[in-house]
Image (cartoon, rainbow, N blue to C red):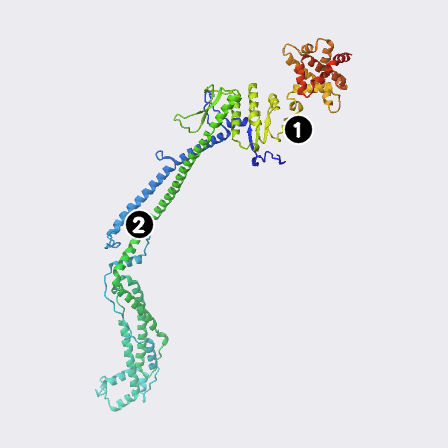
Amino acid sequence: MDDDQVINDIQLEQSNLNVRVYNSDYRKENLSILYDKEGNIRPFTILGEKNIEIEKEMDNTNELIKGLNKELGNIQEKTGIRWEIKQLDEAILKTENNLKKKFTEKASQINRDTELFKSTQQKKQYNRNDLEKDAEIAKTLTASDKQMYKNTLNDEIKPIIEKNDLKDNEESISSITKETNELLLKDVKPSNTIDYLLENNELQQWVKEGADLHRGKRNRCAFCQGKLDDELWNRIDEHFTKESEKYAGQIKILLDKVQKLLRYWEDKTLANKDQFYSKFHNEYEKVNEQWSQLRTRQIENLKYILEVLTERKQDIFSSVNLELNKINDISDEVTQCLEKFSEIVDKNNAYSGNLGHEQDKARNELRLDEIHTFMEAIDYKNQLIDIGHKKKQKEDKDERKDEIIGEIEKSKNYIKGLESQINDEEKAVNQINLYLKSFLGHPELSLEVEKQNDGKDKHAKFSIKRNNEPAYNLSEGEQSLIAFCYFLANLKDITNPEEYIIFIDDPISSLDGNNLFYVFSLIDSEIASKHYKQIFISTHNLDLLKYLHRINTPTNNNKWNNKFFVIEKRRDMDNNLNSNIIDMPDYLRKYSTEFTYLFKHIAIVATEEQNDSNNHTFYSFPNTARKFLESYLFFRYPDHTLKNDKRLKKFFGEGLETVSFINRINNEFSHGENQFDRLERPIDIPEFKKDAQLILTRIAEKDWEQFNSLCSSVGLNAEEVSEIYNHRESYEKEYLK
């Protein structure tokens, strides 16, 4: 590069070079000529590498559309995503209709069941929509809750329940226990005891009770008819003192109190369960059970106290121990239980005014339970999941269907855009036709744009005409000409040639000699004269190389510098074939042809003295002279019946001396296989110089015009070289010696 940067083949793709290349690949890639089964050229749509890529892109896009349409499918053909969506729609609709039918039937059943629905002024009918709403909140009931709600529906307005109040009748167990314990602990003693009575409490009690029955009423014992005198009454009175009588009265009073309280607790019950609404039965039963337990415990407490008091009453002179651990004070528990009961009574009494609302609530709860059972029976939850799954599938497929339709539409629009780009190639066609007619001398060939039958261009199609008739075949050369013309036509779109590198590889490949100059003319006028950054031209053809020596250069371009190279193939020590780009040899670079190059070397031997710089020229002179004479004499005497010796005699004359010396150059000095000893002797420089001068002298004599042109082609002055004329005879005589 100008800035000494080096770019190799690996870095090329990442470089910012603008390069246009014409080669055999270009022809293949930019001119797609299709043949039918009979080998005739068909109209083609591809012209240009860009359009080939466009056509490939169009083909790929059409294949994409084809694949998308296949994926989209057809309902009538039962294929693709459209058919799958229809299948899902039908499956969803079938399941939904089946559920609607079952919901309608169940709603009608609920509507007729007064236990589940009651017609009101606001809601006269229960329908499927109501059932669908209830299904969202449906729930199951326990057996007890379900029975409770059914009982609620059977409830009627009940009388107000009076509360049981124990305040006027209830005596605290703790106070009774205290009073009893104090009385039992009191010690009572007679003034004059009757020992056998003290020893027998039952007998003592019998006597006491008998005394009460007989005093002031009988003189004799009703049992034994014994006389009841004053002495007996005194002894009884001394045994049963007034203090004991008072104590016995206290015990009797306390016994009456306890017995009364016992009767109260034995008769005390709560309100009957039937007095309560069924809604409160559970609460009632719990409180009533607690009350029964408390009542039993209270009765046991009172009976125990009665038992102990009765025992002391029967033997007032003997103390009785009251075991307090057998008495449980449950007053607080009784109070709490009665408070709970009172709350239930309050709620029950208040419930009477709210029974209608509670029964509506019961119907609602029972209906939700019934719906829950119904949904489980029809597997409603799983059916909804299945519907949801199918709807999600359908949603995904609908989304994919819309994507496909969008991609198809986008692809069609993309193809339209590509087609419009191909239509622009008509400009290139016009330019190609101009080149074929004006530059290449092929007015019989032309490209034409073909129209569709409807007159509308889907995209441009091109046909090749020969003399305005369809060309049924094209030679390789004609195809190359069209491709090269297209390459030149496409260079017209470059507005900044100074930024572009042009590479043209063997543009006359497959062309005959008639087209060689035409192609060179196009290169010279359409490329070489432009201010491109660089131009590379490669060829195998020496004639084209000859023309390229005369190629024009852009005006006012100081950077232009023609250089010539050759690609040399060599094998290394491992017999691997390599190629190197080297400077072009002088005979090609300076003289265009080997013939001119050989003449130059003969002139050097004839006019220069041998030295180290030109030693190789003198050494190879015999071969150089032989090759030059063979070419020169063949074109001068093209008769193929003449042998080389005959041509030498015709040109140099019949003198044996001349023929002999030329024959030595032509045969002996230029070959070593039969004169091996010749190769062992030093080269004869004076003899070679004389031979070279003789060759140049005879050409000048025979054809001065050609001699002058040959000298000019190798940079020599023919007049100066011709001074050897004056010495020719002396040269020949000296040579013959």
Percent from the top left, x then y, of residue 698? 70, 13
Q: Is residue 420 visible?
A: yes
Label 1 packing within 10 angstroms: few (<14), some (14-19), many (20+): few
Q: Which label belongs to residue 698? A: none
Question: Dot 2 lies on which element?
Answer: helix
Q: Are marks 2 and 1 in contact (CB under 8 Å)?
A: no
- Location of mark 1 (residue): 572
Q: Is residue 241 visible?
A: no
Q: Which label belongs to residue 132? A: 2
Q: How many marks?
A: 2
Question: Dot 1 lies on which element?
Answer: loop
What's the distance in space between the residues labelled 2 and 1, CA to CA? Answer: 93 Å
Name the residue at the bottom extreme.
231
Label 2 packing within 10 angstroms: few (<14), some (14-19), many (20+): some
Percent from the top left, x then y, of residue 242? 29, 87
Please name whichever residue, 630 or 380, is drawn nearer the observer in this view of the structure: 630
> In the visual, does 505 lie left or right of 345?
right
> In the visual, does 342 lie left or right of 591?
left
Please name whichever residue, 231 or 505, is drawn nearer the observer in this view of the structure: 505
In front: label 2 or label 1: 1
278 above or below 223?
A: above
**Splitting the image into 4 quarters, where does residue 249 fall?**
bottom left
238 above or below 387?
A: below
Percent from the top left, x then y, of residue 357? 27, 59
Name the residue at the right extreme.
737
506 above or below 179?
A: above
Which numbered disc flags the more N-terminal residue, 2 or 1?
2
